[in-house]
């Protein structure tokens, strides 16, 4: 079993308390993103420019859809739900990396979502996959199933044979034992690297994954020519999570 990290402890009292105090959670609501983790991908994209119009992208552990929302925006498959940067007099990428997010939240005008246009001009595609059903993301194709099952892989390949970029914010679920959480998360990412990427990631492609252990960095270096690590500001300070970016996939 795996699930998106955004939902791993949703509904717990601690989770609800965190959300009520979290500026990224508040900003996500205002900008119509489904979860605060969307801002992690926005920061990663600002730093590494992984997504370009025309690319094919697979989002693993996609529920509730925040990362897929960002992907379809970058692919220009769907117009962004957030307020245009020009309205605030600042660059779009800078908007999300500033530390004064609370000021940002309270200064933002509300957006009229009825005025959105659906843009599908890039020729790229996004496929969103998760174990659990979740609300469809406009501009993305959805596959519900276990990424390690042949039936699910077949469904994905019916949509797109290979992908230029695979991203994973998948999480095995919360555990009372932090060591077990780290172990399970590392095993999940390892299975994706060893069992899924050889079937779905194009040679020379890129992979972005959440990590809780440096062990995963060593594995990534066996499969990618260039490997980088990054911890977005949107990651909670107390969290051990960071993200690994692998470029130029070496398919064995």
Image: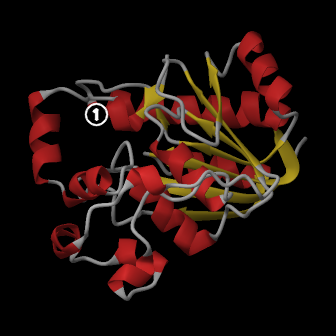
Residue 97 at x, y percent in the picture = 37, 75
* Residue sitting nearer the eye, 73 or 37: 73
Q: Pointer 1: residues within 10 angstroms few (<14), some, or many (20+)?
A: few
Quadrant housing the C terminus: top right
Q: Where is residue 39, by image quadrant?
A: bottom left
In this rendering, position of residue 156 left or right of residue 189: right
Secondary element type, mark 1: helix
Q: Is residue 81 above or below residue 177?
A: below
Disc 1 target residue:
178
* Residue sitting nearer the eye, 129 or 166: 129
Count of labels in the image: 1
Residue 50 at x, y percent in the picture = 67, 63
In this rendering, position of residue 58 left or right of residue 239: right
Residue 71 at x, y percent in the picture = 60, 52
Q: Residue at x 53, y 32 (%)?
A: 61
Q: Is residue 215 visible?
A: no
* Residue sitting nearer the eye, 189 or 84: 84
Q: Where is residue 225, by image quadrant?
A: bottom right
Q: Is residue 162 above or below residue 149?
A: below
């Amino acid at each position: 079993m795996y699930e998106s990290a955004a939902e791993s402890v949703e509904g717990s009292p601690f989770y609800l308390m965190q959300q009520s105090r979290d500026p990224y959670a508040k900003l996500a609501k205002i900008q119509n993103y489904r979860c605060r983790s969307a801002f992690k991908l926005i920061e990663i994209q600002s730093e590494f420019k992984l997504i370009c119009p025309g690319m094919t992208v697979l989002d693993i552990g996609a529920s509730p859809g925040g990362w897929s929302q960002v992907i379809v925006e970058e692919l220009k498959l769907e117009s962004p739900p957030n307020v245009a940067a020009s309205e605030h007099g600042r660059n779009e990428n800078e908007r999300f990396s500033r530390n004064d997010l609370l000021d940002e939240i309270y200064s933002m005008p509300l957006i009229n979502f009825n005025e959105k246009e659906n843009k599908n001009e890039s020729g790229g595609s996004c496929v969103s996959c998760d174990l659990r059903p979740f609300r469809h993301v406009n501009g993305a194709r959805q596959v519900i199933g276990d990424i390690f099952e042949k039936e699910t892989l077949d469904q994905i390949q019916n949509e797109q044979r290979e992908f230029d970029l695979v991203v994973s914010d998948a999480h095995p679920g919360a555990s009372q034992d932090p060591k077990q959480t780290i172990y399970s998360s590392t095993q999940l990412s390892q299975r994706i690297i060893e069992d899924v990427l050889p079937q779905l990631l194009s040679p020379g492609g890129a992979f972005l994954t959440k990590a809780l252990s440096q062990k995963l960095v060593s594995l990534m270096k066996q499969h990618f020519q260039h490997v980088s690590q990054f911890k977005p500001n949107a990651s909670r300070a107390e969290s051990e999570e960071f993200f690994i970016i692998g470029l130029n996939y070496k398919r064995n």
